[in-house]
Image (cartoon, rainbow, N blue to C red):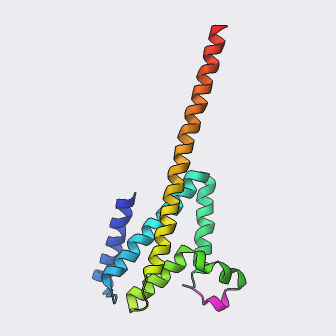
Amino acid sequence: MYPAIILASLAMITALSYFNGFSPADLNQTILVAVVAAITFMSIIYFLNVAFGVVGKFLVLIFMVLQLAGSTGTYPLELSGDFVAKITNYLPFTHVVTAFRSTISGGPNIKGNLAFLIAVAVVMILLTIALLEFKVRFKSNKNNLNESNIDDKLAV
């Protein structure tokens, strides 16, 4: 998955540059933000799908709506209400928007934003690995129990 989304990020920036004349203040950092954002969101989506199945897909939808409302990319924070003001700093998309604004128009350092996004991605990847490992072990133990029950019944 990750190579595909990295290529998609590169293709997006290339297409914007070629077809729309997109010329950010720092092209390399803009590409870096696109790649890190893609990895982060893919990790979140994959974890929710692995953890909750079909319900996880619905949770992704809710998560993305919260992201749009809380990122201050559409409306200023002052117009969004108290709830949004409380969650905005904890939403990955807020950090993506801030980092893109900085790299596109020249602004403050994006290291803090990238660190947050990488931390979220690493946590989601580790949780996904742990969950998959748990599911494999649980299924293996369940199969072993079923096999021992069959052996007991055959012995009688």
Compared to residue 130, the image places residue 19 above or below, namely below
Please identify the residue farthest to the right as the structure is shown: 82
For the N terminus, which image quadrant? bottom left
14 and 121: which one is in front?
A: 121
Horizontal arrangement in the rendering, residue 143 relative to residue 98 (left or right): right
Q: Is residue 18 visible?
A: yes
The residue depicted at 62 percent of the width and 88 percent of the height is 77
43 and 122: which one is in front?
A: 122
The residue depicted at 61 percent of the width and 52 percent of the height is 52
Residue 149 is situated, as x and y percent measured from the top left of the image, at 64, 20
Horizontal arrangement in the rendering, residue 74 relative to residue 30 (left or right): right
Residue 67 is situated, as x and y percent measured from the top left of the image, at 58, 75
Residue 45 is situated, as x and y percent measured from the top left of the image, at 53, 61
Horizontal arrangement in the rendering, residue 51 relative to residue 9 (left or right): right
Q: Which residues are magenta?
A: 73-80
The residue depicted at 33 percent of the width and 66 percent of the height is 7
Please identify the residue farthest to the top as the structure is shown: 156
Residue 152 part of the magenta-drawn span? no
The residue depicted at 34 percent of the width and 90 percent of the height is 25
17 and 28: which one is in front?
A: 28
